[in-house]
Amino acid sequence: MVNSLGVEGVDAGSTRVGVVPAVGWTEGPAGGLPGPVPPIPVSRHALEMLRRIQIAATVLVTAFAGAVLLVGWGLDVPAARGLSPGSVVRPVTACCLLLLAIALGLSRTDRRRSRHRVGVACAGVAGLVSVLALVEHLTGTDPGLDRLLPWPETVTRPALADPGRMAADAAVGVGLLAAAHLLLLARARWAAASSQLLAAGAGLVGVTAAYNTAYYYAFRGSPLEQAPSGSALAVALALIVLGAGTIAVRPDAGLVRVMASDSVGGLLGRRLLAAAATVPFVLGWLPVLARQNGLYGQRLGVAFLITGNAVAFGVVGFVAANFATRLEASEAHAVRVASAGHAELVALIDNTSAVIYMRDLDGRYALVNREYERLFGVRRENIVGRTDHDLFPPEIADDFRANDLAAVARGSPVSMEEVAPGDDGPHTYITVKFPLLDDEGRPYAVCGISTDITKRKRAEEEVRRLNAGLEERVRQRTAELEASTRELDAFAYSVSHDLRAPLRSLGGFSQLLLDDYGDKLDGDGKDYLNRLQTNVARMGQMIDDLLDLSRATRVELHRQPVDLSELAAGIVAELRSADPGRQVDVTVADGLTGSGDSRLLRLMLHNLLANAWKFTGKQPTPRIEVGSARDGAGEVFYVRDNGAGFSMRYADKLFDPFQRLHPSAEYEGSGLGLAIVQRILGRHGGRVWADSEPDRGATFYFTLTAAVEDARGQRRDLVGRGQPR
Amino acid sequence: MDNDVILLVEDNPDDVVFTLRALQSNNIGNRVVVAADGEEALGHLLPDDGTPPLRPALILLDVKLPKIGGLEVLQRIRADPATQTVPVVVLTTSNEERDIVASYQLGANSYVRKPVVFGEFVEAARVLGLYWLLVNEGPPRTGGGA
């Protein structure tokens, strides 16, 4: 906006116009955040200019006064005693100007005390001399100050009517400047302003004298004009320059600060000052020119002067008004833009589910959002200025306060969990706190954004509780299971003993009948007793198989490396010795090893091999093969025979207890063998499946680990019931 | 003399009949003393009423017995110096691993499961008698009672 006005010299970024109070929406007693209005910095542009003025004044006046003293008076060169032959700068005046120039040069630019003292001494001497000169003027005495100077009296005295005396106005100017310099030493706020006023006074004395002299030269020769009695033009100019330089010493204080400030006011002030410094002089000069050229007389000149002043004021007023009007319009626009943005921000923080708040460094609330109001049942007008200790139990408020201070101390956002009371018990929040920093990077408030995570927390708690409950239930179930396993164990034990005993009696007595009374029985009687014997034997086998099945389920698994080749060979040897009448071609591959419970694996292999043995009974060239195939993820073992086989249609019944695919008259068996096999492999994490065709033999595959099973999911379809138990 | 005595600890009268019959079938003529439970067996072996103790050549011991179980009887036999060297054959229906293990741990000399089929039972009795009464050289007799 500033640039659109064409205003140069004001940094766009630092313009304070239209800045909205940061906490405008709180409208409470603490709405004053963030603290007092900061001072507007001095425009860099103005600062640089003032510094240059100070240096230029020092250099110019030092050079001029030095030249007057050394060349004009020391070397006795009359032309070098002023700016013109008629205007002579007296040695005393030149000395005072030189002292003031030195004082100006030493002030501020260097903080070393020694130089500072020299500057003060210079100003003090100049001031003393000016006072003496004024006393001379008032009393008409001649203390002969010039005699104190090293220049020969023979040069100075004859050249002047009143050789030692400084002109009265020059004395006033020098005195004011000296006082201004001395005032710069004071720290008080008013001192700088007073110093600047005094320096300005000295400058005005110079201006007056300069104008007076200028008029004299303009009307030289006219009977109306007499030679000015005041100081020389050069002295007047030196006073103006020194005045300006002295004013420039403290750009950050007093009146200058306003004029030099990097604000619209400063800019306007500088422009008006420029106008004030030029317009009256130009207007005042015009009648002089007119009169010189005989265009109009003094009366008309004065009239023109007044009119011109009026016009000038009017123009300046218009320009200022125009400037201010455009500025205000622009400002209003900026305020609208800013407040729109402000409203958006307020809407934003009011419509979030998070709790947002701001507190000052003392913990007093500056703002809260709507969620905060809703949650804690307060209104923002009422909460502003209060602290957490007014709202929450002391320990909770202490926690909040500690977190606030932690964020302040760290100077950057801090994240933590906080607990605050809610309607249904304590609520847990994830909070981010961060300090708000002013222009100098100092924290002046703390902002907090808290998100309620109570639901999540409670859900986690619930999950934990359920898990604990689940574990408890698992423990209970395990205990129950163990109890039932013990019952099963007892049952099996009991079956083993008790069921077999009567069976043995049946078999025993039927045998005794045959032995002792066989001659009294006919063929049928003996046949019945033989059938009884046969069934006793079968039932005994069934009981044993049932016990095996139960054992396969309940005994503890002791895994160890097992040589399956050796196991198989041993079992085959047993089968051969139990059935010496048969010739079976058995091949057992070497190096079949696995990991498992050797006793259970023996039982498993026994059942598979006994089956193969049994079902090859009607095959003229019976063959049994035990081997393995490495397939994909692991090793698959198999027991293959060329016996009776079975239809795959019944494959899903194969492993069920008491399921038989062959009539017992053809092949004896309890129907438990494959159930035992499956159970044992299941307990090892492995699987068993079969592949067969009637009269073309059967192959039983098995694995000992779960990994193999997972790698061959398709096999599951082949033998759907092969699920390990 | 009880040098040839076989102590049969068996509660099942049928099994007593079968055992006697099997021994008889195999011409094992040793006198057989039958105890129907563990208490009775201990009464014979380690009497506490002053009666002379029995010192059998072989004890056939069932595991599952009323009053005092077979395994406890075995333990007591092995704990007493007078009976600790008597050969004990555990003759039982059970083929439970724990029974087998416990029997051997307690000092059984043999563990035989009673076969269901009588022929096998007779065969087992024959082998047992042959081995323990004829083949095996038993521990030297330390006198003993009457």
Image (cartoon, coloured by chain):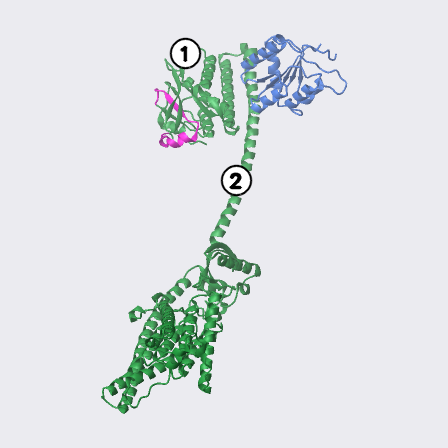
Label 2 lies in what chain? A
Answer left or right for B87 relative to A476: right
Residue at the limit of the structure toward the front, as seen here: A154
Residue marked by disc 1: A583
Question: SS class of the residue under badge 1?
Answer: loop
Determine which quarter of the picture holds residue A479.
top right
* Residue A101 appears in the rendering: yes
A723 to B143, vertically: above or below: below
Could you tell whether A132 is left or right of A513 in the image? left
Range shown magenta: A693-718
Q: Which mark is residue A474?
A: 2
| Residue A9 vs residue A358, the one in the foreground | A9
Residue A49, position as x, y percentages in the image:
35, 69
Q: Chain of mark 1?
A: A
Tell me which corner region of the image, top left, top right, bottom left or bottom right, holds residue A275: bottom left
Outermost residue toward the right in this view = B50
Colour green belongs to chain? A
Residue A163 occupies quadrant: bottom left
Residue A207: percent from the left, percent from the top? 35, 80
In the foreground, A678 or A684: A684
Helix, strand or loop status at disc 2: helix
Residue A371 % position (x, y): 45, 62
Residue A229 is tagged as none
Crowd band around label 1 with a 10 angstrom C-alpha radius: few (<14), some (14–19), many (20+):
few
| Mark 2 to mark 1 CA distance (whole Å) | 54 Å
Q: Quadrant of the N terminus of chain A?
A: bottom left
Q: Are marks 2 and 1 in one subunit?
A: yes
Circle 1: residue type: Gln
A48 or A388: nearer the eye? A48
Chain B appears what colour?
blue
Q: Residues within 10 Å of mark 2 (few under 14, many from 20)?
A: few
Q: Position of residue A471 (x, y in %)?
A: 52, 42
